[in-house]
Image (cartoon, helix red, strand yellow):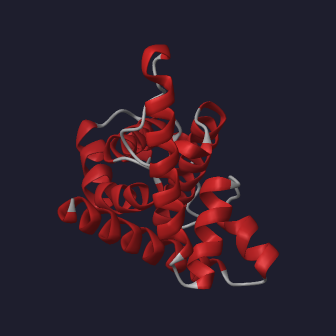
Amino acid sequence: MTRVASDDEAAIAELYDRFGSLVYRMAYQAMPTRADAEDVVQEVFVRLWRTAARYDPKRAALVTWVMLLARRMMVDRLRRMRARVKPSTLEEGWSPASPSEEPRASLEQDERFASVMDRIEKLPELQKTVVKRAYLNGQTLKQIGTELDIPLGTIKSALSRALVRLRERSSGEELAT
């Protein structure tokens, strides 16, 4: 990190090679779209480069520092997105209806939202609870774990499994139509 702080390009590349895929996997699971995940990864590594001088190996392992910074940035980004986006826009590709097609588009959005909610309702109880609290209520995984008195790792696993199931069911429905 000392080399990164002194703008050593080889050190920056090494940092990315070492942690890029790990940060991307975490971002891909947490963010609503692949593009958002890629943006987060870029933002994380820019922040790592800018704050490299602050890293203290006595306080945390490098991987811990990188992942904490990445998680913080993802939570902030999701909160910003939630402030701009209504919960009914859970499914990628939704857009607000234009005034001329408002009744039809609104009905289609209602149907899509109902479909997503039906898929969420079919999840196992913990997965359903975590998805609703994280994506509809905007809670952090730590908050969810604290309120449910469940370890954070269990909450993360439940969310990850739920997202996989929702993606599988979503692509299965697309193939059926």
Kindly tell me whether residue 59 is visible in this rendering.
no
- Residue drawn at x 63%, y 64% is 132
Of residue 30 and residue 67, the one placed in the foreground of this image is 30
Q: Position of residue 63 (x, y in %)?
A: 46, 65
Image side of residue 160 versus residue 73, left or right: left
- Residue drawn at x 24%, y 59% is 174
State which quadrant residue 54 falls in: top right
Q: Position of residue 97 (x, y in %)?
A: 47, 25
Of residue 60 and residue 111, the one placed in the foreground of this image is 111
- Residue drawn at x 24%, y 55% is 17
Above or below 115: residue 88 = above
Above or below 34: residue 102 = above
- Name the image quarter holding the C terminus: bottom left
State which quadrant residue 161 falls in: bottom left
Kindly tell me whether residue 6 is visible in this rendering.
yes
- Residue drawn at x 42%, y 61% is 29
Above or below 168: residue 84 = above
Above or below 121: residue 27 = above
Of residue 120 and residue 18, the one placed in the foreground of this image is 120
Image side of residue 132 versus residue 94, left or right: right
Q: Give the residue furthest to the top.
A: 100
Q: How many marks?
A: 0
Q: Position of residue 86 (x, y in %)?
A: 61, 38
Q: Give the residue furthest to the front.
A: 103
